[in-house]
Image (cartoon, rainbow, N blue to C red):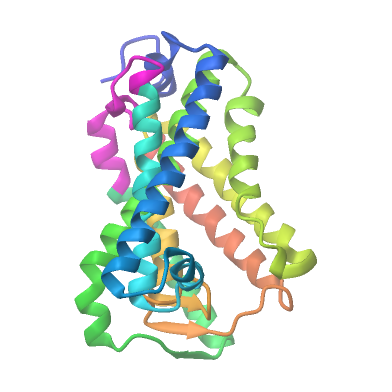
Amino acid sequence: MTPPGTTPFDCYVAPARFYPQLWRLLLGCVLCLSVYMVFVFIILLAAASLTGAPSAAALTAVVAEAEAPAATLILLASFLGMALGPMLAVRLLHRRSARTLFGQSSQLRRHLPVAAALTTVVQGSALVIWFHHLEAEPGLDFASWLKLLPLSMIGLALQTGAEELVFRGYLLQQLAARFRSPLIWGVLPSCVFGLLHYDGGLGSNAWLIVAATTLFGLLAADLTAATGSLGAAWGLHLANNGTALLILAPEGMLSGLSLHRTSIDVAAAPWQVAVDCIGLLLAWFFIRRVLAR
């Protein structure tokens, strides 16, 4: 329960106010990146050994495309390192429990499934449009897809949860503990989140993807601030990525676990990015109306 006179966001940021120094945050970012890189290297070595790949470097190219189920699952599993980074940072540098990154557990448990369900309804409606306008080809057969679904969902929960822990958890909390302006604690991490999705292979339209992912970051930050936990943002993220990775995936872009694939070309049809952004905005609107009351 939120104490009288405080907002859910105040309660969410409160644990970060004890050690808000910027040098701690900078060291924490270095620690997060280091843990992630080391973990990715370890998991690639382990996967290369198990699969008989000639080297971790050779396996990296296969995993980066993630056109096969095993490669996609390995890529999703690598995000465990990203999740561990902020958990270690808050413990070692800010002297607080990793649980404080998530917000109140009761809110997290309630908000995550509600947000995921609302987003699934919106994205499900959008899929009708996509299947009507795009030439979808078969991906995994249904039996294989269903067999892999538990692992796929665990991987998706790990990937989306890890990104939320870093950008709407650690960075947002520590910046909000130091700065009052949402332009710093809300916009700055969202811009970084967007820039990390830059793909030079898309040409000039690569910045459309950056803009779309930055918009997602802003909406997720707003949901976190409005609800006081990662639940709503995580639910939005999980359902949004689940639709794109498990139902209808672009060919050659994390399509290994999807039921259907499409030769979508963002560089040739930027309107598709605009449709995705409209879907995100609708999902955010409904989640905010239901949870932030």
Q: Nearer the viewer, residue 289 or 126?
A: 126
Q: x, y percentage for residue 292?
A: 41, 35
For the residue pair 86 and 220, the one nearer the viewer reads as 86
- Residue range in magenta is 91-112
Residue drawn at (31%, 42%) of the image? 111
Look at 65% across and 41% down and name the residue there.
191
Residue nearest the viewer, comparing 150 with 21: 21
Tag count: 0
Q: Quadrant of residue 163?
A: top left
| Residue 60, above or below 10 | below
> Quick check: is 103 in the magenta stretch?
yes
The answer to whether 236 appears left or right of 184 in the picture is: left
**Residue in view at x 66 percent, y 56 percent:** 198
Determine if residue 290 is in view: no
Q: Residue furthest front?
A: 54
**Can residue 146 be spotted in the picture?**
yes
Secondary structure of the magenta portion, mostly? helix
Queried whether the magenta region covers residue 166, the answer comes back as no
The image position of residue 238, as x and y in percent, is 38, 55
Q: At which x and y percent is residue 155?
A: 31, 59
Task: Give residue 89's position: percent from left, percent from top.
Answer: 40, 26
Vertical placement of residue 51 versus 107, above or below: below
